[in-house]
Amino acid sequence: MISNEGVRLGAEAAHRLAQTGLYEFGAGLTEAEFTRIEREYGFEFADDHRAFLAAGLPINVPPEDGQTWSRPWPEWRGGDLDGLRRQLDWPVEGVLLGVEHNAFWYEGWGERPADGTAALDTARRHLAEAPVMVPVYAHRYLPAGRGSFGHPVLSMWQTDVIYYGLDLADYMHQEFDEARDEVDDSWNPRATALFWRDLL
């Protein structure tokens, strides 16, 4: 059962993005498409993320020079399956890169094995238990999970994780609205995703 508040929040996020005029939208994802995507990739969208994608799929525009992501909006319908898999794997792969090359180690994993391969295997095993993060746009993510909504949007670049929105609707304002105000002291997101919130 999808929550009414999650649906409202997702619809508001879609409306805020549409108001910017930056993107055109394709038809929203259908129930059959959500079922196929969730089965294919092994996660369920949070309610607000699902409602956002049901309202309409933002269409990628040609990238500007130097842009990190050529297709920042995940192309859930008819997109490159390997590209989607890479975008879904990005948060975990980023942490593994930190373990391998930057001596990153999460204290909750216990003592770091001296052997590099063993350290990577241990990290990979623990990361398999961390909440799945689902791409919203480029390296901005929401936790997966049917029946959940209102999570802060996180920007994830290896082990550098920062807030990019109080929730999905606020994120659309923060990322895309040219007229946004400076963030004040009342802007106080609280991450909900276990493990990932400890990297903030």
Image: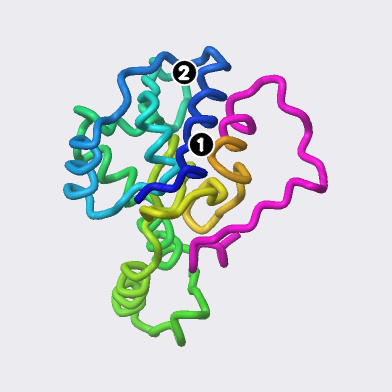
Residue drawn at the location 53% of the way across and 12% of the way down? 21
Q: Is residue 167 left or right of residue 4?
A: right
Separation (CA) of disc 1 from disc 2: 33 Å
The residue under label 1 is 8
The local secondary structure at tag 1 comes to helix
Residue type marked 2:
Glu
Q: Residue at x 53, y 38 (%)?
A: 9
**Magenta stretch contains residue 188:** yes
Q: Quadrant of residue 84?
A: top left
Check contact, mark 1 vs mark 2: CB within 8 A: no
Q: Which stretch is magenta?
A: 172-200
Asked if the stretch drawn in magenta spans residue 111, the answer is no
The mark found on residue 64 in the picture is: 2
Instruction: Name the outermost residue toward the right.
Output: 185
In this rendering, would 147 be left or right of 189?
left
Magenta span: helix, strand or loop, mainly?
A: loop
* Residue 94 percent across, percent down from the top left: 41, 55
Residue 63, by quadrant, is top left
Query: Which is more foreground, mark 1 or mark 2?
Result: 1
Give percent across and percent down for residue 171: 58, 37
97 shown above or below 86: below
Alpha-carbon neighbours of circle 1 within 10 Å: few (<14), some, or many (≥20)? Answer: some
The amino acid on which the numbered mark 1 sits, given as a three-letter code, is: Arg
Q: Quadrant of the C terminus?
A: bottom right
From the top left corner, tell me how far across and down residue 197 is, in percent.
55, 62
